[in-house]
Image: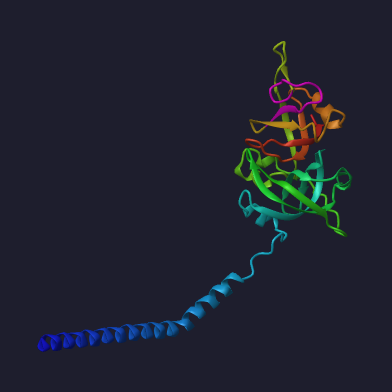
Amino acid sequence: MKKLLSLLIAFGMVAALTACAGGQSSTASTDSAATDSTASEPAETESEDTADTEDTAEPAAAGEVMSYDEYMAAAIDDEVTVEVYVQAKQSWWEDKATVYAQDQDGAYFLYDMACSEEDYEKLVPGACIRVTGYKAEWSGEIEIMEGTFEFVEDAEPFIAEPLNVTELLGTDELIDHQNQLVSFTGLTVEAAGQDDAGNDVAFLYNWDGSGTDGDDLYFNASYNGETYTFTIESYLCDNTTDVYAAVKALQIGQVIDMEGFLYWYEGVNPHITSVTVTG
């Protein structure tokens, strides 16, 4: 019985020693991990410092004025800011204005730009404005939508001279001048369609002839054997303007010179502001 008791006591002491040894091993392991963690802290801190440096790198300033090339390189739906000069006003409705604008390098179509009626009156040709909005595309036409603007005080007025693009008709280069004030010379009036009696006519009210006086006018003119369609946008030049009357008086076979804005809709669709019969 004493031997048994002695054996049990001995066994208990061994177990206790083993447990103590295990506890020391665990503590040593924890201390080692703490040491490793402490040793790694400087590297971790360096990483955080690097991240902080990257995060605070200066981005492009919001609302910074773009050059024409930067504007054209921007993606559709990007916010853009440009400084431009009014060339013509198309319309004002419910505090929104549509404006043709240009600078020395290119042109812009400002569609439904927020504008009071009072400010609309101040948007005279040559006036400089800073516009912020979103670059958009509609059937090939590049424009700025949902824009706001402010007048640039003390800016010298700029009114663009029309660029003669007659020789660019039918070429890929023509679109590079989208929305610019342009001219066409030596074109021949072609039939735009037929009237109710089946006779060829030089113009149509609306693209399909469905309109009446006061609607857009569509007419065709040819150059080097190719025929192109031109438009009198009634919001830009209504039926009280000289150009509207001039197109209504056109005769097939006449030779004409024109000026207008190189608008785009499923291809070139110039908005004409002046027509002169030359032959």
The percent position of residue 219, horizontal first and vertical second, equals: 73, 27
Q: Is residue 5 above or below residue 146?
A: below
The percent position of residue 47, horizontal first and vertical second, equals: 50, 77
Classify residue 197 by image quadrant.
top right
Classify residue 236 by image quadrant.
top right
Q: Quadrant of the C terminus?
A: top right
Q: Is residue 198 magenta?
A: no
Q: Quadrant of the N terminus?
A: bottom left
The percent position of residue 206, horizontal first and vertical second, equals: 73, 25
Residue stretch in magenta = 205-222
The percent position of residue 275, horizontal first and vertical second, equals: 80, 33
The colour scheme is rainbow
Q: Is residue 225 above or below residue 193?
A: below
Residue positioned most to the front:
1
Q: How many labels sit on residues?
A: 0
Q: Nearer the viewer, residue 243 or 36?
A: 36
Overall secondary structure of the magenta section? loop
Q: Is residue 45 left or right of residue 191?
A: left
Q: Nearer the viewer, residue 247 or 76?
A: 76
Residue positioned most to the top:
197
Q: Nearer the viewer, residue 120 or 56?
A: 56
Q: Is residue 217 magenta?
A: yes
Q: Is residue 150 left or right of residue 176?
A: right
Residue drawn at point x = 77 percent, y = 50 percent: 148
Residue drawn at point x = 33 percent, y = 86 percent: 28
Classify residue 37 by image quadrant.
bottom left
